[in-house]
Image (cartoon, coloured by chain):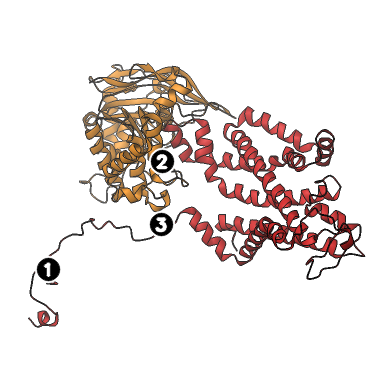
Chain colours: A orange, B red
Amino acid sequence: MRPILEVKDLSVSFDVFGGEVQAIRGVNFTVNEGEAVAIVGESGSGKSVTAQTVMRLIATPPGRIKNGSIMFNGRDLLSLSEKEMRKVRGNEIGMIFQDPMTSLNPTMTIGSQITEGLVKHQKLSHSAAKTRAIELLKMVGIPNPEVRLKQYPHNFSGGMRQRVMIAIALACNPALLIADEPTTALDVTIQAQIMELMKDLQKQMNTSIILITHDLGVVADVCDRVIVMYAGQVVETGTIKEIFRNPQHPYTKGLLKSLPRLNQSKDEPLIPIHGTPPDLIKPPQGCGFCSRCEDAMRICATEAPEVTTISETQMVRCWLQDPRAAKGAGMGKEESA
Amino acid sequence: MSQEMNVNVTPGAGSNPFEKIGRDQNGGERIVRKSLTAWQNIRRNLYENKLSMVGLYFIIAIALMAIFAPWVTGLITGYNYFANELANANQPPSWAHWFGTDDLGRDMWVRTWKGAQISLFVGIAAALIDLVIGIVYGGIMGYFGGKVDETMNRIAEILYAIPYLLVVILLMVVMPQSLTTIIVAMSITGWINMAWIVRGEIMRLKNQEYALASKALGAGSMRIIFRHLIPNAMGPILVTLTLTIPGAMFTEAFLSFLGMGVKSPVASWGTMIDNGRQAMTTYPWRIMFPALFLAVSMFALNVFGDGLRDAFDPKMKK
């Protein structure tokens, strides 16, 4: 599989009144052709900033891309001019936003919002763009597309609007689709429909997907690989199987433990991760998760852990992987708890 | 069996009410409800506001009269707004001259409607110039923010700080006394209010998710401002526009009253009021009619503007 997106050493900061918020601190990941990758993590872990940086959508100032590179199909997106970047957005990389209720322009018909990108990027005539828009609406499962085309966003329900957003994002056949929490604002039955739709479309069009979410249930269903982010860093990556069956980082384990399971007895409480993530205006010296980690060691507080390779696909950033970490002691502690 | 008897079953295929026909061809997806656009909603809100509808009817009536009355009267009676007829000077209202005549014997009815033409033209032209400059300037100021906003805003503030009458008088020195001069004079500083309103709206709207979504689709700044944000700010813009028109009309009347308006024999309500003021006690109709129409149209436009604001913003309704 050919890598389509390679993010290397990406650091992004925001200059705010109190100082510099280091939202992303040295993030590395790749997305291969036709692959669906999930980025998970709690609020403030840098998921959305990563996605918006790939699209170069963060406002500068206050945002600042400190270093790193984003290679997309052999080009470094960070070195492109704004004009060149405009040709990438929507045409080569599509994006779906969290809240379909506010992501559509209330004063434009659905049709003109879908055709806007087609006319601009693909240089289609208006009638050709309209035909394509009808096709797209059919594809995302909106009945009566000819009538719907002339309607305004307020004539659509939330789930329908997210379908329209997907149609807009996929209009130009982008090689990569970034979905920033596409189902968070929808109710559960609609969530399932939307995820199903995205899965189908991905297979049909062989689009790569970056799915940003904090819902691990959604991830297991749709994605091939998972990137776990915490405090602006990638703490663990691996295939779905590896992350769900053999998580290595205490944070990943914590996330999985906090999920309800079907075979769980109903009296058994869910185990939350205690505490809150660190304020990135002054990131901790050692591991970001240290203060919340059950297995924290002395070194975790003082030195940042390096990346350990578990398998060809699984990597983790944790001191517990170090051969010097007393594995016996860690196990013993878990048993006594 | 007895149930079957109750239904009127006639033999032959297709007429059996219990024949299976299956699912609807459309898959049960039918759009039954008429879909209202935002404009239809606003129109409906406006219709419900009786007072502002009366205002609107007045404006339409005055506009129609302004366009047709001088011409039709000219065809029937031969009166026009400029021909002197000194023998008939200062006639009170009569069947021959409905609104009387002025000091040069010109028919006041024709002159009043001619004046309406000029007044409405000045009002609408000045408001439209304000609109265009204000939207472009305010849109750019609001969208880019930061240093661009800072600089452009300072320039606007400096212009706003210059006494308005001073600008007009200075302009009158340089330019000929004409309609164009009045409109230019009003537009020099008039657009600033519109620009500030647009700026505020754009600043509010640019953080909306659809602006970001449109940027993520590859739209440039100008496209986002003028295609996505300005249409969403149309409510406040239109309201400001309708309230600018009476303001501009009033300013024109005021300038004419000070002797800086259009030159005789061209009439505007302002020059007519100024002219009538000189003989207010002896020939009151000379000031009464233009003053009455100025006041009525001013009132009608303001009432309509208020109604429009309520129609755009349902939250403002009591």
Q: Nearer the viewer, residue B294 or A210?
A: B294
Q: Nearer the viewer, mark 3 or mark 1?
A: 1
Q: Give the CA separation, mark 1 to mark 2.
A: 45 Å
Q: Position of residue B121 (x, y in %)?
A: 69, 49
The residue indicated by pointer 1 is: B14
Find numbered disc 3 in the image and state the secondary structure of the residue it sits on.
loop
Residue A179 position (above or below residue A88) = below
Q: Nearer the viewer, residue B107 or A196?
A: B107
The residue indicated by pointer 2 is: A113
Q: Position of residue A330 (x, y in %)?
A: 29, 27
Which quadrant of the rendered structure holds the N terminus of chain A?
A: top left
Left or right relative to B65: residue A327: left
Residue A333 position (above or below residue B109) = above
Q: Give the CA separation, mark 3 to mark 2.
A: 18 Å
| 3 and 2 marks in contact (CB < 8 Å) | no
Q: Earlier in the sequence, mark 3 or mark 1?
A: 1
Q: Residues within 10 Å of mark 1 (few under 14, many from 20)?
A: few
Find numbered disc 2 in the image and state the secondary structure of the residue it sits on.
helix
The kind of residue tagged 3 is Ser
The kind of residue tagged 2 is Gln
Q: Position of residue A306 (x, y in %)?
A: 35, 17
Find numbered disc 1 in the image and state the secondary structure of the residue it sits on.
loop
The residue indicated by pointer 3 is: B35
Q: Give the CA separation, mark 3 to mark 1.
A: 35 Å
Which quadrant of the rendered structure holds the C terminus of chain A?
A: top left
Residue A265 visible in the current orientation = yes
